[in-house]
Image (tube, rainbow, N blue to C red):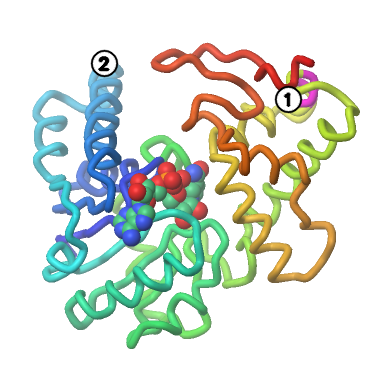
Amino acid sequence: MKNVVVIGAGTMGNGIAHVFAMQGYKVQLVDVSEQALSKAMATIEKNLDRMLRKEKIDEAGKTATLANITPGADLTKAAANADLIVEAATENVDLKLKIFKQMDEAAPEGCILATNTSSISITKIAAVTSRPELVIGMHFMNPVPVMKLVEVIRGYATSDETLNTIMELSKNLKKVPVEVNDYPGFIANRILMPMINEAIYSLYESVAGVEEIDTVMKLGMAHPMGPLQLADFIGLDVCLSILNVLYDGFGQDKYAPCPLLVNMVTAGKLGAKTGEGFYRYTPGSKDKEVAPFFKK
Ligand code: NAD
């Protein structure tokens, strides 16, 4: 396996391209947005510079990694020589089904089609392709170059061979793969999202303020980041999509997204990527303060 295509150059796509390219794979990074592509290339370079400063790579490693990534907008062209395609586009069922149909038509026979979806059914995505045995979930964690886990999700029709290939490949990327079956939210988000939703409900019901909730979970449970800051970091639109998948998939009220989360997404306050969520962020700095809405 040599040629990898990554679809979507947002928060996750740039990190996925980074880790493949660092291990010598030729990566084509595809996005419909020109702006997302240039931002992704700048982010990859910035993250490589950080690794250089920490002496995790040398100058030659940085140059080789960047040379392994080709950004572009044409999925069909990029997929023509692919051994593996990892889809990391926006978390939206209809969009993913459309992209998988396109990928299936454009990719050569035998090419594995993986998705980085946080929650959407692998079985459902596989069913729109002519190769469900070659479709699998490859759920990286954010930030991809730093986080060790890859949740590898086996759809109903995923073959043993595809599973074994992706488990081995994840190890080649210096990650730790964990095999999980295909049920809503898999493991990571089935456990994480109800916790984040409960933290938002606690804020909505005025049990405590933003910083207080995060401090309780950081100091009390030894979490490196509080749940509200983590939600901002993941993206509040992504959190809402995942909760909706859990709610629809299990049909249980405990997964219903908090109305405050719904309002924030409707208002375009999506967290760190838009500069404001539960906190307000200063561009280019690690500084943050509680968002004005929650200071009232
Ligand atoms: P994002 O919004 O940062 O980026 C999504 C990108 O997809 C955008 O740049 C958008 O232009 C692009 N896109 C949309 N339609 C496209 C198309 N037809 N072809 C090519 N590109 C297209 O989203 P993200 O946070 O990077 O999430 C991507 C995927 O990764 C989602 O499935 C999400 O659930 C999953 N995920 C996210 C996180 C996280 O912490 N954000 C963690 C694990 C998994």
For the residues bearing labels 2 and 1, Cβ distance under 8 angstroms: no
Query: How far across and how far down the image is residue 212, in percent?
Result: 79, 19
Horizontally, residue 76 falls left or right of residue 157, namely left
Return the residue nearer the eye: 51 or 9: 9
Question: In the rendered structure, does residue 13 fall within the stretch colored magenta?
Answer: no
Q: Residue 141: in sight, yes or no?
A: no
Image quarter hosting the C terminus: top right
Residue occupying image coordinates x 44% and y 54%: 90
Residue occupying image coordinates x 74% and y 21%: 294
Q: Nearer the viewer, mark 2 or mark 1?
A: 1
Mark 2–mark 1 Cα distance, whole angstroms, equals 31 Å
Earlier sequence position, callout 2 versus callout 1:
2
**Disc 1 residue type (three-letter):** Asp
Looking at the rendered structure, which numbered label has been put on residue 279? none
Query: How far across and how far down the image is residue 293, in percent?
Result: 71, 22
- Give the magenta-colored segment's residue range: 212-216
Q: Compared with residue 282, is residue 115 higher up or lower down, i.e. above or below?
A: below
Question: In the rendered structure, does residue 213 fall within the stretch colored magenta?
Answer: yes
Query: How far across and how far down the image is residue 261, in percent?
Result: 70, 42
Residue occupying image coordinates x 78% and y 36%: 199
Residue occupying image coordinates x 78% and y 46%: 258
Looking at the rendered structure, which numbered label has been put on residue 53? 2
Q: Compared with residue 15, is residue 221 higher up or lower down, i.e. above or below?
A: above
Query: Which residue occupies the extreme bottom position in the image?
Result: 130
Image quarter hosting the N terminus: bottom left
Q: Main secondary structure of the magenta part?
A: helix
Query: How far across and how far down the image is residue 58, in percent?
Result: 16, 25
**Disc 2 residue type (three-letter):** Arg
* Residue on which disc 1 sits: 214
